[in-house]
Amino acid sequence: MSYDDVEIEDMEWNEKLQAFTYPCPCGDLFQITKKELRLGEEIARCPSCSLYITVIYNTEDFADSNRKNKNIEPPKRQPVAVT
């Protein structure tokens, strides 16, 4: 059972860790990376204790751009007259 459910908007981006973080009661930080979010992970773990939180976020916000645009047709080419 997770310690808490936390919205991604309530977490902070930590440039040094390259992860979204949220304070843990032990004094450290719960952490989850953008890569983990792209893979559909929703658990942010604390590296110092056994606690973890469930991160609530829209998976489409972190989907690979290739996956996101998979159903979009490429732009149609316009015919060009050569003289």
Image: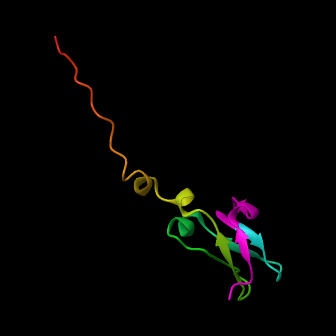
Of 47 and 65, which appears nearest the observer?
A: 65
* Residue at the top extreme, as displayed: 83
Q: Which residue sits at x=22%, y=24%?
A: 79
Residue 53 found in image quarter: bottom right
Q: Which residue sits at x=68%, y=89%?
A: 1
- The answer to whether any part of residue 17 appears in the image is no
- The answer to whether any part of residue 12 appears in the image is yes
* Residue at the left extreme, as displayed: 83
Of 34 and 80, which appears nearest the observer?
A: 80
Q: Which segment is the magenta one?
A: 1-20
Q: Position of residue 45 (x, y in %)?
A: 67, 79
Q: Is residue 16 magenta?
A: yes
Q: Position of residue 65 (x, y in %)?
A: 45, 53
Residue 48 found in image quarter: bottom right
Q: Is residue 66 magenta?
A: no
Q: Which residue sits at x=65%, y=69%?
A: 56
Q: Position of residue 63 (x, y in %)?
A: 50, 59
Vertical placement of residue 27 versus 75, above or below: below
Vertical placement of residue 3 versus 69, above or below: below
Q: Position of residue 50 (x, y in %)?
A: 70, 89
Q: Which residue sits at x=59%, y=62%?
A: 58
